[in-house]
Image: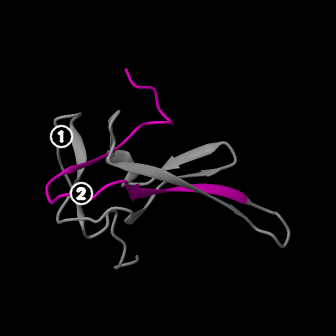
Amino acid sequence: MNKNYKPLPDNLRLGFSDIHDIGLFAKKFIPQSTNLGMTHFKIGELLIRTPMGGFINHSDEANCIKAKLHFTNEDMIKYTYTKWNLITLEDIKAGAELTITYTFYKIE
């Protein structure tokens, strides 16, 4: 077992959300354009949500985006995958909830 594995970056925590149930919150100030790590990845048609990606709530006025990164094994093209990282669009104050505008899921 990897003792260094953490499902969330050190500057984030889970908490009760006014948007929906549990959300992702800043433990401390996070500057604009900070890359907080991977939220989702896709291999073939399989979309996989990381622990961090599972707790980001939707907002039409989101303070973060998912940045899409596409990878291919150029030597033999045996695999191709895509991953999305969470990037802050603005400065995030300590205690603020991080949000994105959902693109993978229906909002009801």
How far across and down, in percent of the image, does residue 39 sit? 44, 54
Q: Amino acid at mark 2?
A: Ile
The kind of secondary structure element at disc 1 is loop
Figure quadrant of residue 78: bottom right
How far across and down, in percent of the image, does residue 10 sit? 26, 70
Q: Which mark is residue 17?
A: 1
Q: Amino acid at mark 1?
A: Ser
Q: Name the residue nearer the viewer: 59 or 40.
A: 59
Which residue is at a point 36% across and 55% down the rendered structure image? 52
Q: Which mark is residue 39?
A: none
Q: Which residue is mark 2?
A: 92
How far across and down, in percent of the image, does residue 74 sit? 80, 69
Figure quadrant of residue 100: top left
Q: Is residue 31 above or below residue 48?
A: below
Is 17 positioned to the left or the right of 47 in the image? left
Magenta-drawn segment: 80-108
Residue 97 sits inside the magenta stretch: yes
On the rendered image, what quadrant is the N terminus found in? bottom left
